[in-house]
Image (cartoon, rainbow, N blue to C red):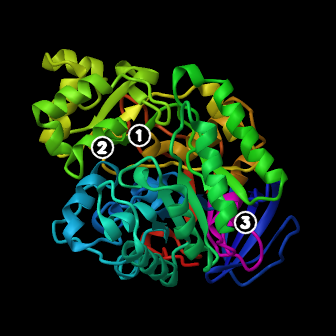
Amino acid sequence: MIHIKNALICDGTGREPYPGEVLIDGEKIKAVGPAPLGDLDAEVWDAQGETVTPGFIDSHRHCDLAALYDPDFGEIELSQGITTAVMGNCGLAPAPCAKEHRDELYDFLEPCLGPAPKDSFFPKVSDFMGALGAKKLPLNLGVLGATGAVTTAAKGYGNVPFDKESRKKAEGYIRDAMEAGALGLSCGIMYTPECYSATEDFVFMARVMGEYGGYLTSHIRGEGNTLTESVEEVLEIGRLAQVGVNISHFKVTGLRNHGKGIERAIAALEKARAQGQDATADCYPYTGGSTTILSLLPPTVLAAAGPDVPGFLGTVEGESLLAREIEKEFDSWDNMVSSIGWERIRISSCAWEGLAGLSFRKAAEKTSLSESRLFCELCSKEQGKVGVIVMSMAQADVDRVLALPWVSLISDSLYGGGERPHPRLYGSFPKFLREYAGEKRLLPFGEAVKKMTYLPAKRLGLKDRGTLAPGMAADLLQFAPAAFTDRATWEDPKQLSRGITRMLINGKEPGGKPGKLLKR
């Protein structure tokens, strides 16, 4: 047993820290409270007045491949106090994977998930989870089924509607994921091939998942001019499928939408919640997002390109079409280039030497190419394996969202960022606590911790995580809030956070890799 004394207990429920003690027996918390627990035959852990909280839960992290293949996986996460991470978000996952689409899928995923060995192949989610379960894990991991991977495996990347056969395949893939223990289902309605899917297609897949008690989390169709309509689409999917829904990385993009755009979307969610719908959202504490270059392509270009988008952009026809379409406004699609400008889009990862870290405008000047020509060159020569950071949000909007009581904190970390990844990979959790509970004082400390512990655990259905209480898993942190800080910046992002004094994962210190694969 471990007896933690002289601590400030912040239990994850939203309650402010109070002086207290914690008793841990094996993998579980046996007792916690303000009163002395007495003299016990246990190893004493003197917290010396520092704060003890539940381990942080990152319910949106694109670490699917890193968890399997990166020998240093866990270092970045543990430095931020993350004891549980969930993968398979935004419909992006390495499983299920049909053999004929293996290279297409993995090339598409690489800017987000990072590279995978050429022999990496997981026909079903159960195969992928089996591979995770066979490893010693530095932290707890959970898996979501991903409708983008399901759709690709069932019918490929082209603009082909679901038919009876492909629906049957999709249902089989989702049932396999849920029966293997997936925590829910994610979709990436913005991405190929899901951008071609209709609302009823997502309702069908969500209903299958809902039979197992999971929830649906969605990267919505549009986050700029069509934000409210895109939120309402996911709410409608949830109502028709009768499942709980979550809006992934809830934000508004585009300079013209700052301020007013987010209020309309918040009103839509709060109306649904007031009517009894199980609807939540999550958010990361930065004004820039990170994605793949292919997500910036207008629908007209995607339609003309067919399944081989990089190949099409390498042709005179493709380059000419992109140049005409890339700065246009569209009624039902948010054009990031026209809404924020080339100067606010940074190249975060590419093989072209000297371009990572530059804005598209600066990179175009450096290469003596137009922005649209450079876009085509990057897509065609690097098979779309290019990551970008889009500085698309207003700080006031991010602050507004993160203060909402039904919004939890995420990092949305991508692992394909090369030398200039988004700093959220390294610093989201301490940055949030430092800024929102500290410098800005927008949230009480206890409420800020709740957004990183209890709220995500509740959303994920993890009934034994997220709070310090008897019977709960012994995932916990000790730190001095003033010393717990992020160091990653836009200019120098690969800097580990620091300030965690001690940590337990399932009752053990992290050196022995005591993490578990968590299943619904």
Q: Quadrant of residue 440?
A: top right
- Residue 467 bears which disc, if any? 3
What kind of element bears circle 3?
loop
Residue drawn at x 78%, y 42% is: 444
Q: Range of the magenta residues?
A: 453-477
Front one among 89 and 492? 89
Image quadrant containing the N terminus: bottom right
What kind of element bears circle 2?
helix
Q: Residues within 10 Å of mark 2 (few under 14, many from 20)?
A: few
| Residue type indicated by callout 1 | Ser
Residue drawn at x 36%, y 82% is: 134
| Residue type indicated by callout 3 | Thr
Main SS of residues in magenta: loop
- Could you tell which of marks 2 and 3 lies nearer the N-terminus? 2
Front one among 59 and 482? 59
> Closer to the camera: disc 1 or disc 3?
1
Q: Which x, y percent locates residue 378?
A: 18, 35
What kind of element bears circle 1?
strand
- Could you tell which of marks 1 and 3 lies nearer the N-terminus? 1
Image quadrant containing the C terminus: bottom right
Q: Is residue 327 visible?
A: yes
Q: Residues within 10 Å of mark 3 (few under 14, many from 20)?
A: many
- Residue 303 bears which disc, if any? 2
- Could you tell which of marks 1 and 2 lies nearer the N-terminus? 1
Residue at numbered disc 1: 290
